[in-house]
Image (cartoon, helix red, strand yellow):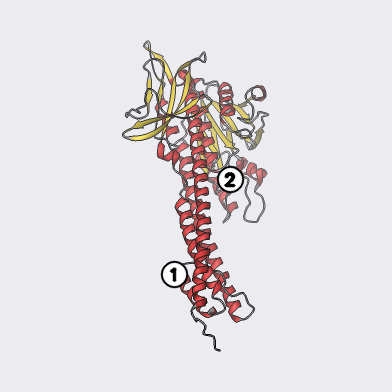
Amino acid sequence: MATRRNAGGGIGLGLKSGLVVGAVTCVLLSIMAAIANSSGKQAHLDAAMQRGYAAALALAAPGVDGWFVEQNDKLVSRRGSQARIKEVVDTGAVTAWLDGPGDTKLRLHTSDVEIASTPIVYGSSGNVDCVAGRMSGSDLRVFRARLVDKGGAPAGTANIAWYDSDVTKGPGSAVLLWILAIVGGLAGIGAGFLASSFYTKPLGDLAQSVSRLNRGNLNYRATHRGNDELGRLSRALETMCDTLAEGEEAQERLGLIERETELLAELQTAMQPKEVPSTEGFEAVAVQLRGSDSGSDLYDAVPLDGGRLALFVASTSARGALGALLAGMTRAYLRSALEHDDDVGAALRSTNRNLAQSMRKGMHVTCQVAVLDPAKSQATVYIAGHRAPFYACRGGDVSVVHGEGLALGLDAGAVFDRRLEEVIVDMPQGTRIVLTTVGTYDFVDESGEDFGVDRFQELVRKQAPKNSEAFLNLVLGSLDIALGDGERMLDATIVTAKRMV
């Protein structure tokens, strides 16, 4: 007796298997997407809160006397306070203000931030609280740190605010994760169908796969693993899809890296002084070249009493966005200390204490500081753990100033204070000093050799007699020629001054 078979039974089984496999895959990928999205949001929130705590501490660090001064029997803000607040806010905050003793206030914007008498508290870290606020109809997170007077007693608050949405928003990859879950589910359905019907329609399945590839779906996996021509063709097609997918992923990662690099460059540029202030009898200039894997160098120039000028360069142990934030904190602390008390040694000790309290253990900042004194024709030099040499050039000779100081932030005070020393460098007419960072000479030249500190020192000695603009141009030109088509990895910073009369 003949048995009649249903020709469509194989296809029905393929559809059922595909639906089961697709459903399971979609559920698993959805769970993974939800977990990844939740973890990403929490990580972003924690990082944003830590940034707010650190920024509030940076504002409060100078104390009441660092921001306000008594004038005509009342307190008023010190000169340059508005610009110093703006430097902190320019790192991403909405606004910042300080409430001093009595009714004394120092605001960045005219719009008031509304905070309830019993505000919602989002968190606390040490002496900083995070509470809810509103400004112009938008929800804020306000980080408030205690502002103390000379005796260390609370005398006000330092406040900095971010939009609540900027603090709580999750990573932008959430939508992509859900899309991948859906695509993965669809791919599971297709894979189940193709696997179950492989023996009946191998060529048809391969044709359908090619059609999907034409529509941009690169999730193809070979449906025939045999050693015949069909198996080899199927595996070759799979390899091609993997290569294309890897190329797309690499392009996306490159775009993200380039955007981060642009943002870090903008942040570094915003922190740099527009020009080096002039001081009688000296010619001072500075330049910074950004490396592809850094964002950690800074330089600044701060006028002091008596016509003196403090020049400094620094490098942080962190890289990328964290390095840029740490550089901004260091500059804010040191400038604030110098403007409050022009004793550079005391300013460095104060900055070290603030950084040691604010930074994660093990992080540090190295720096060189040179104070130009026109009246004495000399420079007073301080070196805090900085590996790059400090040069003094005169009459064709180069001398290197070494310091035994400890890097900022490694020690809370006792060891740093004991090891910090000052070195006097006489600067008769024609003397040039050069402050720099390791990245200036730490690169591989066109021939594949390390450029090195010795070649850089010879370059400094040769060009030292030129005026400062020409000196910088000639030194940078020689470094660019040596680098050729290579890539500079670290930031390169040069600050130089020459005694003219």
Q: Secondary structure at mark 1?
A: loop
Q: Position of residue 322 (x, y in %)?
A: 54, 39
Mark linked to residue 490: 2
Q: Nearer the viewer, residue 252 or 330?
A: 252
Q: Nearer the viewer, residue 69 or 230?
A: 230
Q: Nearer the viewer, residue 195 or 382?
A: 195
353 on left or right of 70: right
Q: Position of residue 153 (x, y in %)?
A: 50, 14
Can I make out residue 280 in this image? no
Q: Residue at x 49, y 39 (%)?
A: 45
Can I make out residue 78 in this image? yes
- Mark 1 and mark 2 lie on one chain; the one further toward the N terminus is 1
Q: Position of residue 160 (x, y in %)?
A: 43, 30
Farthest residue, direction front = 1
For the N terminus, the image quarter is bottom right
89 on left or right of 471: left
Q: Which residue is mark 1?
A: 215
Mark 1, Cα crowd under 10 Å, few <14 / some 14-19 / many 20+, is few
Mark 2, Cα crowd under 10 Å, few <14 / some 14-19 / many 20+, is many
Q: Secondary structure at mark 2?
A: loop
Q: Position of residue 16 (x, y in %)?
A: 50, 69
Q: Nearer the viewer, residue 333 or 481?
A: 333
The type of residue carrying mark 2 is Leu
450 on left or right of 139: right
